Image: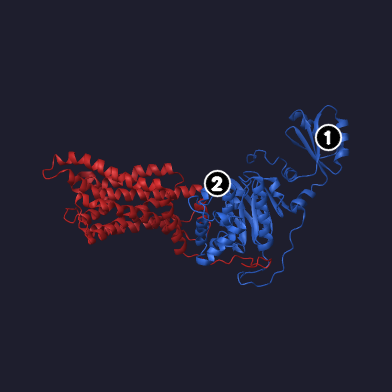
Amino acid sequence: MATMTATAPRTANTSSPGVLLPAYSLWVREIVRFYRQKARVVGVIASPLLFWIVLGSGFAHSFSSGDSHSNSGHYLAYFFPGSVVMIVLFTAIFSMMSLITDRNEGFLLSVLASPASRSAIVLGKVLGGATLAAIQGIIFLAFGPLVGAHLSPEAIGLSALVIVLISFELTALGFAIAWPMDSTQAFHAVINLLLIPLWLGSGALFPVNSASGWLRFCMLLNPLTYGVEALRSSLFPGTQTAFPMQVNLAVTVVFCLLTFGASWAIVNRRTNRPAA
Amino acid sequence: MATLSPRPAPAKTGTGLKGGSIGDTGYAPIQLENLSHNYGNRQALDALTFTVEPAEIFGLLGPNGSGKTTLFRILSTLMVPSGGHAKIQGFDVAREPNKVRQQIGIVFQAKSVDVKLTVAENLKHQGHLYGLSGSKLNARIQEVLSRVGLSDRTKDYVETLSGGMQRRVELAKGLIHAPSVLLLDEPSTGLDPGARRDLWQYLKMLRDDERVSILVTTHLMEEAEHCDRLAILNEGKLVALGSPFDLKSAIGGDVVLFETASEDGAAKLAKRMAEQFEVQAVVLGRTVRLERPDGHRFITGVVEAFPGEIEGVSVAKPSLEDVFIQRTGHRFWAEAKEEE
């Protein structure tokens, strides 16, 4: 670029950016943005901690009355995997809400008008959100020993894997929901109507086997149930779960693929509507 | 002012530089052919046909709702037109959007920078989207930032910059991949006069030094005056095309305005003037407007002929607004008519 003369090339000299470089860039942006907003970091760690301690201690009494060998420590332990999943859910929700603000602020417009492929956008955004969610969830594991989780290297590795899978499926689900939306208010409605119930009915608060009738049926249909179960088995190897670990992991992986596939399809769908 | 000077002569080409695989093959950087678009029943663009030449600043002038934004979205590959074709550097915007995207730099009216990132981070991200990376990208970032005068703000968060500086980051973003065609949507929105002047100086430099073809949408007459050529849009139709100077010259002579006391008075005056002086006058509210080669002499005649009916008179050289009124029969800012 030393010579800025009238003989400069008349057509731009760029090659196709591929998928990985733009996806990497969007992934980095997601993480950098998160840690620059301190309130977000605090909120996402502190609120599940608060829920865990307050809800866990509160429920512990009502649950222990009926159960002979239960005490308050047991319920806090029972509730622990659910709390980890809640952190993951919150982080996933918040990072996908950024998709809507990106759209409204015009940032997304400049990405859509660039030669970066739509697949790069899904990949970068979902991986970015999932990375954040997984990091927060894994950090929360540090509280595990307080409630008797035996954190051997294998248990940590297995738990981390499950957390990564749950982070990915929830972020991808959030992406598919947030993409067509243009207001964060509408997204809040979906959170209350779909995402929070998904968590409530996942065995996070009460075991699947203790539910009956339609509730039990719904819980068995809920893909998140299998993620919570998988996390519980890896943190507390001795506990009774409704399904073996292989089933839990398999269902979780399938749900990861389904939600990512849905996001991918929504972004790549041909439309005559204005892109943003 | 530059508006009166002809466009810079096309530079000698055929130098066969490495980058320009297509080079100067004679086609225009932007070509529209019967380009149409409708939203449901509403026709937003009606069979537009024109071209933007290499290394010219081309203005798209029109009031709100004239179709500028629709055209801008189609050219920036964000919307597929419902009829006709638009080509950029020979690539169809609807069929080969990715080829087009590599050629164009876009500066949106809305803010597209990420204010939580630094200036350099924003540009780095933008470069990645265009397949640039590493030291080549870093060098390009430095170069673009020094061009827009932000070299000393590289590490600042965009949210700490003033509105004018943020616009310069937007411009730098649009230029990071050295596009051959630059599209700007209402670029001077929110800029003070000094920043506006800088922007136009910079656009002219891009045109002259790097031979970039620049398309600017605007609803500001004084901004349109800076363009080499203009397309004036009204209700989705092309109503005028040419250099600001040619368009104004075509009106011929002076623009004369007569103010009257009421709208009825204006209508009556126009009718009687038409009978007595054999002129075509347009009524715009309480004002009667017409064009005459000998404005001053004409006024005296009219004022003597209709004493008491005229409250004010003005004579002026034609402006771009006069071009618009002449071609459409209504004022630039008049409410867009309901479709007939």
- Secondary element under disc 1, as helix, strand or loop, is helix
Q: What's the amino acid at mark 2?
A: Gly
Q: What's the amino acid at mark 1?
A: Met
Question: Which image quadrant for residue B2?
Answer: bottom right
Q: Please give the label number shown on residue B40.
A: 2
For the colour blue, the matching chain is: B
Q: Badge 2, how many Cα within 10 Å: few under 14, some, many 20+?
A: few
Badge 1: chain ID: B
Q: Which tint was used for chain A? A: red
* Vertical relation: A231 (above or below) A43: below
Badge 2: chain ID: B
Q: Which residue is mark 1?
A: B273
Residue A154, image x, y percentages: 23, 61
Q: Please give the label number shown on residue B192.
A: none
**The C terminus of chain B sits in image quarter:** top right
The reply, left or right, for residue A194 in relation to residue A62 is right
Residue B205, image x, y percentages: 68, 58
Q: Badge 1, how many Cα within 10 Å: few under 14, some, many 20+?
A: some
Q: Nearer the viewer, residue B212 or A137?
A: A137
